[in-house]
Amino acid sequence: MYHIIKISTILKVLKAHTGLITSTKLFEEIEKLHPIIMDSNPKLQNGEATESSTSDGYADDIEAEANSYFHQVFSGQLTIEAMVQMLAQFKESSVEREHSIFECMIRNLFEEYRFFPKYPERQLRIAAVLFGSIIKHQLVTHLTLGIALRGVLDALRKPADSKMFVFGTKALEQFVDRLIEWPKYCNHILQISHLRTTHSELVAFIEQALARISSGHLESDGANIASAIHQQGPT
């Protein structure tokens, strides 16, 4: 059975590591949101919703449908690619219900983060690929992007033999081609010494990307290396 956490916990972590947040506007958003975030009780496990999330504005039927999609993807009934495509459609949907389901699913995924170490290997890999994919496909922006990137960075800092390190590397591999957008984030990653030993190709890509940022020669070489990382990444 999977567990839940409060999104306020993640927001507190972000506030405690403001050096990673380079956007003043983003930090101001966090300052405003943190004191008014209400406790919530979302459920991912078994596709069931037991309580109304009225504090977040999500009705029981929204929670139930959102959770059912997680159940389908974790049980193998729905592919990660199909899930990401559906999320992208819901994000841009003019139908209020679909947009609410999208927001509910992103929130629930973040709230599950603390308990990823308890996941079996297969479910952990699914969670990592899904987590990285929402970054890759720009399904999260601003505050939620900051939360997602911070979650991956924290996972990478865990011991190399830990489940969360595996989660972090697998998630990172999904959006490696976007790393050039965040030079400071790349520098934080490069400070993780054990990553150089376990994922030398990934480290090499980040270093080369940083070296090319000022020269404007990122397109072809960056795409080729990113493709190689996807193919050679750990299972």
Image (spheres, grey):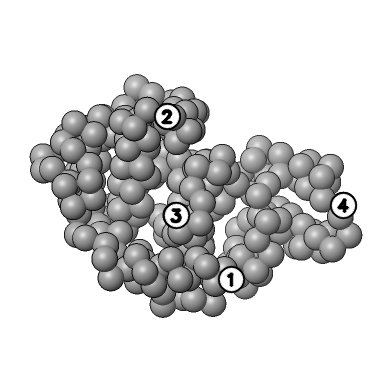
Residue 29 % position (x, y) = 43, 66
- Mark found first going from the N terminus, 4 or 3: 3
From mark 1 to mark 3, how far is it between C-alphas?
14 Å
Quarter of the figure that contains the N terminus: top left
**Of the numbered discs in the image, which one, if any, rests on residue 37?**
none
- Mark found first going from the N terminus, 4 or 1: 1
From mark 3 to mark 2, how far is it between C-alphas?
21 Å
- Mark found first going from the N terminus, 3 or 2: 2
- Mark found first going from the N terminus, 2 or 4: 2
**Front tag of 4 and 1:** 1
**Of the numbered discs in the image, which one, if any, rests on residue 94?**
2
Identify residue type, mark 2.
Ser
Callout 2: SS: loop
Read off the residue under disc 4: 217
Read off the residue under disc 3: 144
From mark 2 to mark 4, how far is it between C-alphas?
38 Å
Identify residue type, mark 1.
Thr
